[in-house]
Amino acid sequence: MSKTKAAVVETITKLHPVAEAICDKMRHYGEGCHESQLRAHFTKEQLDAHGDAARDLANSQWQREIAPRSAAR
């Protein structure tokens, strides 16, 4: 993800705390997280409105965490 897109995603989460909460649940469930798991915590409307931003943020956070590990090898 580009720095610009990451900045946009981070700005969105400041405007929409639900997106950040969805992101946290996605990271809790990990790779392969399915919408049905998230539906236990969020409404369909919340997932429709903020799911894409939450996914982008989760991917951005994961990439930032994995990059230093990859460089150390």
Image (cartoon, rainbow, N blue to C red):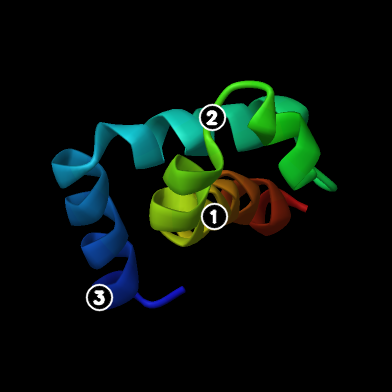
Residue occupying image coordinates x 49% and y 55% = 48
Q: Residue drawn at (46%, 73%), measured in percent from left and top?
A: 1
Dot 2: what SS? loop
The three-letter code of the residue at mark 2 reads Phe
Q: With respect to residue 57, does 19 lie above or below?
A: above
**Relative to residue 46, is residue 30 drawn left or right?**
right
Q: Is residue 21 left or right of residue 12?
A: right
Q: Which of marks 2 and 3 precedes in the sequence?
A: 3
At label 3, counting other C-alpha atoms closer than 10 Å, the crowd grade (few under 14, some 14-19, many 20 or more) is few
Indicate whether 55 appears above or below 39.
below
Q: CA distance from mark 2 to mark 1?
A: 14 Å
Residue located at (38% from left, 42% from top): 19
Most foreground residue, 46 or 18 = 46
Q: Is residue 63 left or right of residue 70?
A: left
Give the labeled residue for mark 3.
4
Q: Earlier in the sequence, mark 2 or mark 1?
A: 2
- Mark 2–mark 1 CB contact (< 8 Å): no
39 and 17: which is toward the camera: 39
Q: From what the image shows, is residue 53 above or below residue 18?
A: below
Disc 1 residue type? Arg
Can residue 20 be seen here? The reply is yes
Q: Which residue is mark 1?
A: 55
Q: Which residue is mark 2?
A: 42
Q: Position of residue 11 (x, y in %)?
A: 17, 53
Q: Amino acid at mark 3?
A: Thr
Q: Measure the C-alpha gap from mark 3 to mark 2.
A: 28 Å
Question: Residue 57, can we see it?
Answer: no
The percent position of residue 50, horizontal first and vertical second, equals: 40, 51
Q: Nearer the viewer, mark 3 or mark 2?
A: 2
